[in-house]
Image (cartoon, rainbow, N blue to C red):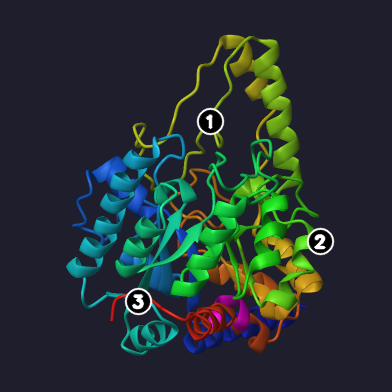
């Protein structure tokens, strides 16, 4: 019996290794640039060694089987839009500086061919995604300028509505997209910038799919049917993806994958309201991770009280698991199809992560869980990167005037 279990484990490990050699992970969303700003003043030195204050560094990316990474360039969505443009340019600059600092490890990528060349050369392809349409300042010229700097996706909103698109966590104001929003989506696809529908309201997802002429993505979302969180994708949207050709890159954010955690969070919020405490930031209190250096300036804190601390002690926050992440992957495969799944961990964008997925070395554990459930190598390779390569290539083919750097 023990030998049988050991043999199965060995076969799973071998399969995962083979999958990652054939098609490394193309991850849709990593917030390291934000953490470089918060913790290092945009210094990019030292990423070729262990950096325990981050969830991401070059050795761990390689250990996790990452072959391409969309680096998120995010600034808060409540910034005035002209300030957001400047701050986002600083984030884009940080990515370019990071790539330049490690030419043996990283390569700037804009196209599917760029990604494949980088992987073949043993480097990690570095793509850029803007997290939030506020960074465009409602300007097609700004959008085009970012595209010329290598931006390959724009998330239409972050947590606040823009004047032209509705966010997942605010009341809809423009029925998804207004005429300006539809014009921005059209221009994005004309110049080869992917439309990212993470963070938007379901009405916005449908509105974008109604006018999309090229595949869309969800750079870091999960399935709403399994976890009722507004950041997740409803089944009626998932059912439309085959007609569009897009991909949901399943995320590891615990609040998006664990219904128990969502229930706990709602109870914790109600207790704070009962005690007259202001709302706590998402993910608070931060979870201690062995080996991680505490950096209190990087994550928001929250007002507390002895009564609330006692409630927390009596109601410990549940942990999310690798199995729950795999459940979301399987659900999206069942509803949208195996050609419409990918991975978008959201590392360094959340201080709370599932057990076993605390940093970017975690991807093989998700693959092992799925392999243990019977997933064949071909399906796992679609999940790790083949689907995302197809989306990149198709968006390039359908872009009449691509503006990425040559």
Q: Assign a secondary structure to mark 1.
A: loop
Q: Which residue is mark 1?
A: 281
Q: Assign a secondary structure to mark 3.
A: loop
Q: Residue at x 52, y 71 (%)?
A: 189
Tell me how far mark 3 sits from mark 2, CA to CA.
33 Å
The range drawn in magenta is 382-386
Q: Assign a secondary structure to mark 2.
A: helix
Disc on the earlier residue, 1 or 2: 2
Residue 367 in percent (x, y) is at 61, 73
Residue 383 covered by magenta stretch: yes
Residue 111 in percent (x, y) is at 41, 81
Disc on the earlier residue, 3 or 1: 3
Disc on the earlier residue, 3 or 2: 3
- Main SS of the magenta part reads helix
Tell me how far mark 1 sits from mark 2, CA to CA.
30 Å
Residue 384 — which label?
none
Q: Is residue 53 visible?
A: no
Identify the image quadrant of the N terminus. bottom right
In the displayed structure, 373 sits above or below 263; it is below
Q: Which residue is mark 3?
A: 109
Q: Residue at x 67, y 49 (%)?
A: 176
Q: Judge left or right: residue 111 versus residue 284.
A: left
Q: Residue at x 62, y 75 (%)?
A: 213
Q: Nearer the viewer, residue 251 or 176?
A: 176
Residue 236 — which label?
2
């Amino acid at each position: 019996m023990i030998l049988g279990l050991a043999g199965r484990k060995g076969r799973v490990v071998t399969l995962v290794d083979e999958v990652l050699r054939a098609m490394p992970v193309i991850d849709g969303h990593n917030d390291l640039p934000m953490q470089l700003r918060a913790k290092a003043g945009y210094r990019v030195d030292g990423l070729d060694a262990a950096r325990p204050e981050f969830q991401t560094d070059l050795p761990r990316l390689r250990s996790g089987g990452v072959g391409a990474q969309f680096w998120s360039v995010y600034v808060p969505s409540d910034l005035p839009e002209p300030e957001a443009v400047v701050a986002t340019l600083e984030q884009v600059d940080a990515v370019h500086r990071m790539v330049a600092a490690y030419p043996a490890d990283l390569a700037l990528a804009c196209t599917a061919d760029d990604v494949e060349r980088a992987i073949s050369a043993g480097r990690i392809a570095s793509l850029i995604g803007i997290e939030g349409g506020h960074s465009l300042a409602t300007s097609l010229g700004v959008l085009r300028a970012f595209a010329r700097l290598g931006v390959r996706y724009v998330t239409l909103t972050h947590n606040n509505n823009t004047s032209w698109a509705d966010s997942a966590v605010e009341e809809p104001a423009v029925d998804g997209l207004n005429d300006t929003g539809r014009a921005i989506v059209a221009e994005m696809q004309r110049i080869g910038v992917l439309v990212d529908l993470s963070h938007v309201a379901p009405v916005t997802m449908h509105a974008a799919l109604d006018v999309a002429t090229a595949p869309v993505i969800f750079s870091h979302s999960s399935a709403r049917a399994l976890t009722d969180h507004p950041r997740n994708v409803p089944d009626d949207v998932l059912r439309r993806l085959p007609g569009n050709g897009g991909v949901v890159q399943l995320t590891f954010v615990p609040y998006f994958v664990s219904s128990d955690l969502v229930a706990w969070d709602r109870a914790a919020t109600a207790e704070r309201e009962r005690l007259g405490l202001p709302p706590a930031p998402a993910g608070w209190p931060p979870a201690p991770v062995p080996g991680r250096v505490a950096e209190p300036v990087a994550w928001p804190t929250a007002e507390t009280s002895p009564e609330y601390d006692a409630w927390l002690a009596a109601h410990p926050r549940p942990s999310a698991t690798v199995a729950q992440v795999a459940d979301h992957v399987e659900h999206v495969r069942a509803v949208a199809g195996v050609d419409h799944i990918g991975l978008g961990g959201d590392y360094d964008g959340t201080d709370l992560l599932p057990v076993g997925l605390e940093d970017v070395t975690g991807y093989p554990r998700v693959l092992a869980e799925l392999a243990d459930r019977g997933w064949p190598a071909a399906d796992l390779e679609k999940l790790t990167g083949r689907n995302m390569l197809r989306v990149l290539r198709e968006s390039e083919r359908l872009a009449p005037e691509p503006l990425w750097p040559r």
